[in-house]
């Protein structure tokens, strides 16, 4: 088997076998993800955070041979499965070790400009987009551990029912909103942000649901710039599909977002 499973990133991912065991081979991984499986994964597993087992690794080629997780998790199941929020909460509550390797997330103006050039949105939408960018700093100041990439394609279920999170190349610190926003399908709406923030507060009582809902909304806009940048840099065929989709939905969504934020 050699099915290429990579979607957005630069790493090559394929389903193969290792000593007769079905597995995932991920080559040319980022330094963040390669070190994650060496240093962080054992600690996370001990804390009840389900992560694929590391079967082998090659530092020279930055290749990880990982446990194959057989069952996918749908977008709907992702938003409603309690184990998903439990896993995310355990990550957020784990103490930060400054010796770990992190990806440093920022909202870069260059990425915003690049996204706007690709999208060619109406002038009103562009003005709102640029204005709302100023809220982005709230996403990156928190010293909370985050996966950084909790979209549906990065979750799976083992045969025995464990919900497993993989793809750790965006592992970092930041607002919990960065891990909650991808649980909402598409751009979502205000009710979606409030709903997921309240559900998160149920498993993490110290969270401020009202403030978190606003950060989730802001994060949705930041993700637009990140997605377009990644797809463009890696010359992915899906870029045009994403551009068309964003062009259709962003103008009305941006007006709603402007009204939701202070």
Image: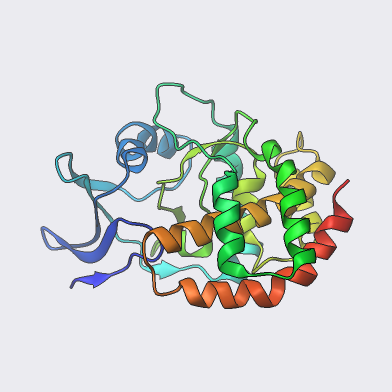
**Type of colouring:** rainbow
**Which of the two residues, 169 or 159, is positioned nearer the viewer here?**
169
In the rendering, at what x and y percent does residue 182 appear?
Answer: 60, 58
Q: Quadrant of the C terminus?
A: top right
Q: Quadrant of residue 231?
A: bottom left
Q: Is residue 217 left or right of residue 97?
A: right
Q: Quadrant of residue 252?
A: bottom right
Residue 191 seen by the camera: no
Q: Is residue 107 left or right of residue 49?
A: right
Q: Residue at x 58, y 78 (%)?
A: 244
**Which of the two residues, 56 or 231, is positioned nearer the viewer here?**
231
In the rendering, at what x and y percent does residue 75 appear?
Answer: 58, 69
**Which of the two residues, 160 or 150, is positioned nearer the viewer here?**
150
In the rendering, at what x and y percent does residue 59 appear?
Answer: 18, 39
In the rendering, at what x and y percent does residue 119 appear?
Answer: 60, 69
Residue 4 seen by the camera: yes
Q: Quadrant of the N terminus?
A: bottom left
Q: Quadrant of residue 224?
A: bottom right
How many marks overall? Answer: 0
**Which of the two residues, 100 or 222, is positioned nearer the viewer here?**
222
Q: Is residue 140 left or right of residue 52?
A: right
Q: Residue at x 71, y 69 (%)?
A: 250
Q: Reply above or below: 222 against 160.
A: above
Q: Reply above or below: 232 against 150.
A: below
> Farthest residue in the top direction?
98
């Amino acid at each position: 088997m050699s099915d290429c499973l990579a979607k957005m990133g630069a790493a090559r991912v394929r389903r193969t076998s290792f000593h007769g065991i079905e597995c995932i081979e991920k080559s040319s991984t980022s330094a963040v993800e390669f070190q994650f499986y060496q240093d962080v994964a054992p600690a996370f597993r001990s804390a009840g955070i389900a992560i694929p087992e590391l079967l082998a690794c090659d530092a020279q080629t930055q290749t990880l041979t990982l446990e194959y997780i057989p069952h996918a998790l749908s977008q709907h199941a992702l938003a409603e499965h309690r184990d998903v929020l439990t896993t995310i909460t355990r990550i957020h509550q784990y103490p930060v070790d400054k010796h770990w390797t992190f990806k440093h997330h920022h909202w870069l103006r260059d990425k915003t400009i690049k996204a706007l050039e690709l999208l060619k949105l109406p002038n009103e939408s562009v003005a709102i987009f640029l204005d709302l960018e100023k809220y982005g700093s709230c996403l990156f100041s928190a010293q909370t551990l985050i996966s950084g990439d909790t979209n549906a394609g990065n979750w799976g279920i083992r045969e025995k029912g464990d919900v497993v999170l993989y793809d750790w190349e965006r592992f970092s610190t930041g607002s919990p909103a960065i891990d909650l926003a991808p649980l909402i399908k598409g751009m979502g709406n205000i009710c979606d942000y409030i709903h997921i923030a309240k559900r998160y507060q149920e498993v993490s009582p110290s969270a401020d649901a009202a403030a978190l809902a606003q950060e989730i909304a802001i994060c949705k806009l930041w993700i637009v710039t990140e997605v377009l940048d990644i797809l463009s840099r890696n010359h992915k065929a899906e870029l045009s599909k994403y551009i068309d989709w964003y062009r259709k939905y962003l103008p009305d969504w941006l007006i709603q977002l402007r009204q939701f934020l202070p």
